[in-house]
Amino acid sequence: MRNNFIRKFLTGLFILTSFSMLTACSGTTFNTSDNQSGITSTQNPDLKGTVKISGSTTVYPIIDYLKEAYKESRPNVTVNLAQGGSGVGIKDAIDGNNDIGMSSRELKTTETGLKAVAIALDGIAIIINPANGVTDISKDNLKKIFKGEITNWKDIGGVDKTILVITREQGSGTRTAFEEIIGLDKDADGNVNTQIMTGAMVLTDAGQISNNVAGKDNAIGFTTLGAVTSKVKALKVGGIECKTENILNSTYPIGRKLYLVIKDGSQENQPIKDFIAYVLSEEGQKAVTDTGYIKLN
């Protein structure tokens, strides 16, 4: 009997813990059990209201995948969803133009009055055309390629072809995270200023990058792990593959968290609180894996 009591207690404690996660922004060593938000779901079919969500094109597939199932269990809550990039989602949250912002990067120190709720983990994959014989790249060479200091594949063991650098637009959370992790976000004087070469091809979503890399045998780009398809090849970085276990144990060097961003205090708004809790629930975290990302719990 005593063992049954202990087992039930531990099970209840696990369930309670897994539903609470409101994090401050942190580095790339991921603690997926540090759930501290206290946000819990009402699971109330009579709940009423509207939740307006905007931002990251990386986070969008997770929320889009979930919103219909959420609507079925809360028929009186309307979820309005729009893309636009992490910068847009965060600015909308600051300006009160949304209820929840989607972000694939951490909040900056200047983006005050907000709370960031981690909902998933992700890796930024470095992708090339499958016909390209290169399989591995160092962070240093990756940085030099995107700065325009290495311009030919032969310089890193490939064929004699000019490298076509493809990047996301400024304001993209994926680009911001990539620049910060690789060291492309500051100039030689330490001023915040992108170091990605001016001649790079600039595209506005992961699908465009994948399609262009797939169609150009000299191209290199970066995209979220969830958007990697058989049309492209993901490079190892420093000998480490971009895959779930390596992101969880922080050996893959270009990992990050994905966030929902809310105004400080708005977590007490019942529809907002309930929707975030739903994303953190078992059903919500299953959607994270179903859409190609890495769940928190």
Image: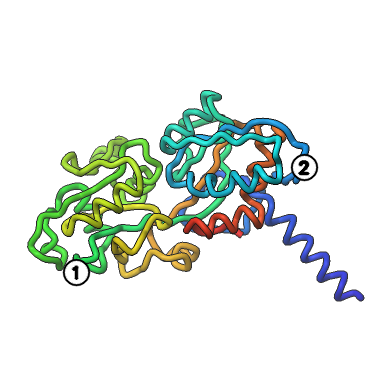
Considering every residue shown, the one lying at the far right of the view is 1
Q: Residue at x 32, y 40 (%)?
A: 204
Residue nearest the viewer, comparing 22 with 221 = 221
Q: Position of residue 210 (x, y in %)?
A: 30, 53
> Which residue sits at x=28%, y=36%?
193
Label 2 sits on residue = 44
Q: Which mark is residue 81?
A: none
Question: The N terminus lies in which quarter of the figure?
Answer: bottom right
Q: How many marks?
A: 2
The answer to whether residue 21 is seen in the rendering is yes
User: Could you tell which of marks 1 and 2 lies nearer the N-terminus?
Assistant: 2
Asked if the residue at tag 2 contacts the one at tag 1, i.e. Cβ–Cβ closer than 8 Å, the answer is no
| Residue 268 screen position, x and y as percent | 71, 34
Q: Amino acid at mark 2?
A: Asn
Location of residue 134 in the rendering, given as x and y in whole percent from the top left corner = 21, 67
Residue at 26% over, 63% down:
138
Rendering quarter of residue 260 = top right
Residue 22 position within the rendered picture, expressed as x and y whole percent measured from the top left: 62, 45
Which disc is residue 133 wearing?
1
On screen, residue 114 above or below 239:
above
Answer with left or right where residue 153 lies relative to residue 108.
left
- Category of crowding for the residue at label 2, using alpha-carbon neighbours closer than 10 angstroms: few (below 14), some (14–19), many (at least 20): few
Secondary-structure class at tag 1: loop
**What is the spatial separation of the Cα atoms under label 1 and label 2, in whole angstroms?**
55 Å
Q: Amino acid at mark 1?
A: Gly
